[in-house]
């Protein structure tokens, strides 16, 4: 029995959209924390000055956890 079956197509996971916690827009990509807080790239760029001090990690404003970029 062959290991590769050309008649079967690969199944991809459906693309999920995320809702930004700051602006409420539905976007394809968000920076997120396990607590449920999510921030779109535009809001992250706008608020990065208050969320990081070393530009390697950001602090979640909801739970205070440090998250890497």
Image: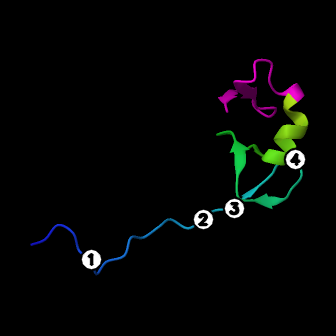
Name the residue that disc number 2 marks.
15
For marks 2 and 1, give the CA distance. Answer: 24 Å
Q: Main secondary structure of the magenta part?
A: loop
Instruction: Of the two numbered discs 2 and 4 on the same chain, state the one appearing first in sequence.
Output: 2
Circle 3 Cα neighbour tier, 10 Å, few/some/many (<14 / 14–19 / ≥20) = few
Instruction: Of the two numbered discs 1 and 3 on the same chain, state the one appearing first in sequence.
Output: 1
Q: Residue 17 carries which label?
A: 3
Q: Where is residue 31 in the image (x, y as percent from the top left)?
A: 71, 43
For marks 2 and 4, give the CA distance. Answer: 22 Å
* Left or right of residue 62, residue 68 in this image: left
Helix, strand or loop at mark 2: loop
51 vs 6: above or below = above
Instruction: Of the two numbered discs 3 and 4 on the same chain, state the one appearing first in sequence.
Output: 3
For marks 4 and 1, give the CA distance. Answer: 46 Å
Say whether marks 4 and 1 touch (CB < 8 Å): no
Helix, strand or loop at mark 3: loop
Looking at the image, the residue that sits furthest to the top is 54
Which residue does the image show at 64% across and 40% down from the upper left? 34
Helix, strand or loop at mark 1: loop
Q: Where is residue 52 in the image (x, y as percent from the top left)?
A: 80, 24
Name the residue that disc number 1 marks.
6
Which residue does the image show at 85% across and 39% down from the upper left? 45
Quadrant holding the C terminus = top right
Q: Give the range drawn in magenta.
A: 49-69
């Amino acid at each position: 029995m062959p290991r590769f079956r050309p008649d079967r197509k690969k199944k991809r996971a459906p693309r999920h959209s995320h809702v930004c916690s700051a602006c409420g827009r539905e976007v394809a990509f968000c920076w997120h924390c396990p607590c449920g807080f999510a921030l779109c790239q535009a809001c992250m760029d706008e608020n990065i000055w208050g969320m990081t001090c070393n530009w390697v990690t950001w602090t979640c404003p909801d739970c205070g956890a440090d998250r890497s970029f």
